[in-house]
Image (cartoon, helix red, strand yellow):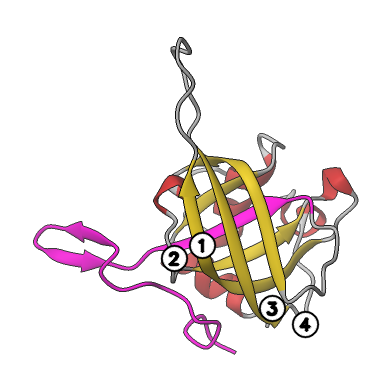
């Protein structure tokens, strides 16, 4: 399966130099039922462009190992995305988003912290290193924007 088979990359999401850039995202969060047809996540922290998530985007879903999950479990399409309003009086506010994701595929091969933790040369440009940096260097649950290389790397698990 390719990243495009997973429904990946919403064309027209981000204007760049007069053209359009494809956006890929991933979420690491507590997942109660890894085989559910729909996943709903409320007020999830966003980092690395994750706040740009929108309806129609494809998302790689990681069940958080901190919550008893096993890493990459599925990919799906965002059916609803809503930014959470900033709280008054907070100087440094981390953007949060609530999303609903319709599952399009279950992972056939695992990919989690155990598979990525040895990738620590943050400047090597490798997709696995990018995922380790964005998800596991700071172990909180979050939605992150990922590169095309990382999306392609993850699509090999489907």
* Residue where numbered disc 4 is placed: 108
- What's the distance in space between the residues labelled 3 and 2, CA to CA? 23 Å
- For residue 104, say whether it is visible: yes
Check whether the beta carbons of the residues at disc 1 and disc 2 lie within 8 A of each other. Answer: yes
Which residue, given by chain and number where applicable, does mark 2 sit on?
55
Residue at the spot of label 3: 157
Total marks in image: 4
Q: Earlier in the sequence, mark 3 or mark 4?
A: 4
Q: Is residue 13 magenta?
A: yes
Judge depth for marks 4 and 1 and give the one in front.
1
N-terminal label among 1 and 3: 1
Instruction: Residue lying at the far right in this picture: please name it.
Output: 68
- Label 4 and label 1: CA atoms lie apart by 26 Å
Q: Which residues are magenta?
A: 1-30
The structure residue drawn at horizontal position 56% and vertical position 66%, both measured from the top left corner, is 59
Name the image quarter holding residue 55.
Answer: bottom left
- As drawn, the label of residue 80 is 1
Q: Main secondary structure of the magenta part?
A: loop
Q: Quick one: 5 or 37, which is closer to the camera? A: 37
| Residues at discs 3 and 2 in contact (Cβ within 8 Å) | no
């Amino acid at each position: 399966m390719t990243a495009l088979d997973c429904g990946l990359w919403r064309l027209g999401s981000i204007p760049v130099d007069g053209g359009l850039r494809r956006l890929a995202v991933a979420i690491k969060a507590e997942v109660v039922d890894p085989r559910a047809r729909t996943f709903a996540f409320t007020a999830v922290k966003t980092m690395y462009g994750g706040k740009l998530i929108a309806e129609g985007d494809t998302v790689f879903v990681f069940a958080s190992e901190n919550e008893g999950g096993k890493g990459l479990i599925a990919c799906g399409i965002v059916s609803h995305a809503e930014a959470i309003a900033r709280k008054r009086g907070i100087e440094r506010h981390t953007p949060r988003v609530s999303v609903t994701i319709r599952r399009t595929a279950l992972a056939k091969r695992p990919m989690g912290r155990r598979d990525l933790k040895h990738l620590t040369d943050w400047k090597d440009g490798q997709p696995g290193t990018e995922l380790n940096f964005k998800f596991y260097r700071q172990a909180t649950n979050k939605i992150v924007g990922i590169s095309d290389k990382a999306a392609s790397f993850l699509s090999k698990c489907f």
